[in-house]
Image (tube, coloured by chain):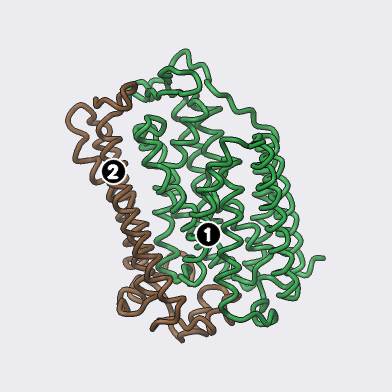
Amino acid sequence: MKRWRSKGILVLASVVLVVLLTFVFWKTGFCAGEAGAEKSGLAWWMWPIILFLFTFVIGIIAPLSGVGGGVLFVPLSTAFFPFSVDFIRGTGLIMALTSALSSAPQFIRKGLANIKVMAPVVCVSMVTSILGGIVGLWITNAFPSGKYYITIALGVVLLIIFVVMLTSKRVEFPEVKEQDGLSKALGLTGAWYEPTMGKVVEYKITRLPIGIFFFALVGFIAGMFGLGAGWANVPVLNLIMGAPIKVAVATSMTIITINDAAAAWIYLAKGAVLPLIVVPSVLGISIGARIGAKLAVKAKPAFVKILVMGIMLLAAALNIIKGLKGLHII
Amino acid sequence: MEKKNDQVYVDPINLIFAKAMEIVTWIGLVFMIIFGVLYLAGLPSFVNMKVAIANWHLPVGHFWEEVKSVHIHGYHWFLGNIHLMDCLSMVGICILALAPFASLVAALSKVGGQHKAFVFLFLILIVEFVFAILKPIIMPGVGGH
């Protein structure tokens, strides 16, 4: 009964999301990213309310699938809302940062997130996320058509994420027989109490140098598009470095706090963070995520995964079409 | 090592990192939301909401030229106007962005002699973070505009 109720709320949230986006798209005259706000005829005070509702629904859906809010907010806003991609990326980054800051301390206290694992990979990814933020803003400002290239690139990144989600096999408890020299020297081990098994589970990290390389790449993409990057951190920690899935998810949230906080200063200094967009969005996702986190316990993961992947595929297609239209290619 | 949940021992550097992050995050959130709501309620602001909505489709550089006739770089645009609600909300966002920095500094104080490699790693992270904050001021020309 409870599972059906959870499923019902999820379906309702998805319907509200589709109706809301269709409404915005229709009111802006199908020209999101251009003078859509002026064409909409909507009263100014409607925008904060629409943003709140939009991010509230994203907040319900996102935690169920293990992706941060930013990975849904950025592509959907780029495709449907009339804001510049600069403001969308700035807001997406602050949303992802707030979500990560709210959950990371809990994970650390339970032994799930380990800052000893985080420190070496973030030393590298922090630099690349700053570079990504610089490149992202530079493209949109230096080239008249830069925003269309960014939009197309975002669509392509989303397609890649879609394929990663489709093909990745998460391993709950990877078996690490031997640690690499660096992981061993740094003592990258840990333990947490797993309530479903009723016992303490110990783990060891391995292949740290390969993990650092992938984190550098992920940091750049996250900084450039204003995404939370949880979608990529988790597979690297889990499939390459041998962290159990729960440890990978929790440590990923801690990594996001550092990377996103570093990238945020570039957006703050360029004026790409507007309280008018950020405040309703952070409020919406914070409240929605609390409901989503409760539903996550009851909902079937397969159903949620399909739901989120469907949204991402749609957003990817729309972003690519919008970018190509902007460049007058189609 | 410190006892946790009667089952698992969590390293004190992890615990102090979490505590510092939690405190600074709450302060930042309260600041951002209270002054953000006051801004949306119509109290004095740096950016007029109607003008912002009419121009938010423009790339960030053009947006500020249209809305305030200014060229933005660095933090003076909101730190110099902290009597206005949207700028106070921006200060809240800055506090949020400082939370991991505060956590790293707090953790560094607990690392101690047994984790010399982590003293080095945390120092690198702190320096990187300070650079990320200062870069827009000391290297304003880099990265566009």
Q: Is residue A17 left or right of residue A129?
A: right
Q: For the N terminus of chain B, which image quadrant?
A: top left
- Outermost residue toward the top? A177
Q: Secondary structure at mark 2?
A: helix
Residue B32 occupies which quadrant of the picture? bottom left
Chain shown brown: that is B
Q: Colour of chain A?
A: green
Q: Is residue B17 left or right of residue B144?
A: left
- Outermost residue toward the right? A330
Residue A202: x percent and y percent? 41, 19
At a point 32% along the width and 47% down the height, the residue shown is B21
Residue A159: x percent and y percent? 70, 47
Front label number (2 vs 1): 1
Q: Secondary structure at mark 1?
A: helix
Q: Which amino acid is tagged 1?
A: Gly
Separation of marks 2 and 1 at Cα, in angstroms: 25 Å
